[in-house]
Image (tube, rainbow, N blue to C red):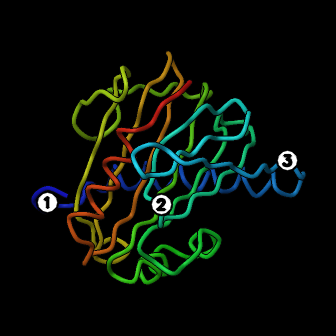
Amino acid sequence: MKCPRRPNRMSHVFWARWLAAVVAALSAASCAGSVNVSRTQSSASGWLAYTQPPAPMHLTFAYPPKWTARGATFVSTMGNVGLVQVTGDTSATAAEFDAASCPKRVQLLHGSGAYITWGANIGSPIPIRLSDMPGRKVWVNGHAARLAEAKSSICGLETLVNGAIETRPRTFLFMHAEVGARAGPATLAAVRKIFFSARAP
């Protein structure tokens, strides 16, 4: 989102593994019938306010009114809880992104769209430290966080935005965004705004 730089392959591997683990846990939870539907309500800024259904994962954030968000709740053995998917500036649905391969997701972005996933970890058997996360140090509503942005050609030309927020010791919120190569500044700014609007009540 800033000047293009070489993709951080270790960062990509971390987020790819995390997303795969979350989606796998979501699939298992879905089979068990424990998936909940998220709810949204209007916010004063004109954006919508997403609130995660009651679960171990506590998350609210704002997102553009023309974008779409959906969420589910579950608990995995790796400490991952919940999943939220946000799509913007693309006709593809979250379900299509969910089922797509890495290169196919780039195609679904239509060059200018955004696909965002949120998740949380409430205590992995393998300790996770914020200092191990890629990106610059930032603060999100009073919580220490990291935000990494880079151009990538691993799955196809796109911009990756990865964020981690430590809400409590060993408790993290994660955001991973894939943004099309032709996305304008407004789309990139919206992705950042979504990240910095996150709250963990």
Q: Residues within 10 Å of mark 2 (few under 14, many from 20)?
A: some
What secondary structure is found at the residue carrying circle 3?
A: loop
Q: Residue 138, how many percent across, how many down?
A: 26, 30
Looking at numbered disc 3 in the image, what kind of residue is underneath it? Ser
Location of residue 97 (image quadrant): bottom right
Q: Mark 1 belongs to which amino acid? A: Arg
Q: Quadrant of the C terminus?
A: top right
Classify mark 3: residues with Cα within 10 Å, few (<14), some (14-19) or many (20+): few
Q: Quadrant of residue 52?
A: top right
User: Which one is in front, 131 or 35?
Assistant: 35
Q: Residues within 10 Å of mark 1 (few under 14, many from 20)?
A: few
Who's the residue at 44% across and 37% down the image?
198
| First along the sequence among labels 3 and 1 | 1
Residue beneath disc 2: 65
Q: Residue at x 58, y 56 (%)?
A: 20
Q: Residue furthest top?
A: 169
Mark drawn on residue 34: 3
Q: Residue at x 52, y 59 (%)?
A: 86
Residue 10, position as x, y percentages in the image: 33, 50
**Element marked by disc 2:** loop
Tag in front: 1 or 2: 2
SS at badge 1:
loop
Whole-percent x, y for residue 120 in the image: 57, 37
Q: Quarter-wise, where is residue 190 in the image?
A: bottom left
On the image, numbered disc 1 is attached to which residue?
5
Which residue sits furthest right?
A: 32
Sequence order check: which comes first, mark 1 or mark 2? 1
